[in-house]
Amino acid sequence: MRKIIERKVFYQCSQCKKKYTNKTKAFRCERRTLEEKIFKIGDRVQNIEPRTCMTTKKQYIFSGRVTKIVGPNPSDYEYEMKWLANKKERLNAHVFMCQIKFPCPHCKEIREERYYAPELKLISRR
């Protein structure tokens, strides 16, 4: 019995490893600038925008540690419009996300969430 196999050609960005079916889209992605890593694993950070505790419905600013750095990935619409609206030199770039582990000060639940670098400020290095 014969197997019919369909072959597809993909083009991959060398920075973010995202695959494209179109060669020009892959080259366009590859031409994006690369954001500088601001934080390192183990850094203590604090968020800028208040979060809301889902249990108590109260807002808070957390303080936590960077546990993982994800990326680089192409920036999305929210990142470009909300966090970099006045910094046109960095629009349309490959960006990093920091995974932060922190306790909620109201319900004491340990959370682990991902944030872009402009959403955080450094408290201290390891």
Image (spheres, grey):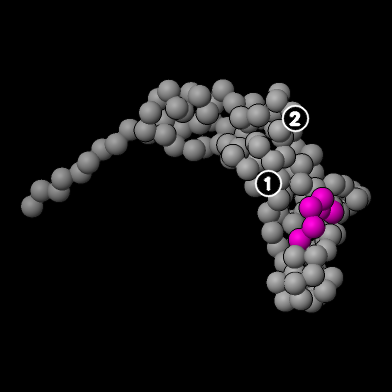
Q: Secondary structure at mark 1?
A: strand
Q: Is residue 16 left or right of residue 8?
A: right
Mark 1 or mark 2, which has the lower sequence index?
2
Q: Is residue 35 magenta?
A: no
How far across and down, in percent of the image, does residue 42 sit? 82, 53
Q: How far apart are labels 1 and 2 at the CA level?
A: 20 Å
When the figure is inspected, residue 102 is found, relative to residue 90, above or below; the finding is below
When the figure is inspected, residue 88 is found, relative to residue 62, above or below; the finding is above
Q: Is residue 107 left or right of residue 3?
A: right
Say which residue appears at 15% left-offset and 48% top-offset: 3
- Residue for badge 2: 86
Q: Is residue 48 visible?
A: yes
- Residue for badge 1: 97
Per the rendering, the mark at residue 12 is: none
Say which residue appears at 82% left-offset and 50% top-offset: 48
Q: Amino acid at mark 1?
A: Met
The answer to which image quadrant residue 56 occupies is bottom right
Q: Secondary structure at mark 2?
A: loop
How far across and down, in percent of the image, does residue 49 sit? 79, 53
Q: Mark 2, residues whose alpha carbon is within 10 Å: few (<14), some, or many (≥20)?
A: few
- Number of the front mark, 1 or 2: 2
- Residues shaded magenta: 46-51
Q: Is residue 38 left or right of residue 71?
A: right
Q: Amino acid at mark 2?
A: Asn
How far across and down, in percent of the image, does residue 86 sit? 75, 30
Q: Is residue 73 visible?
A: no
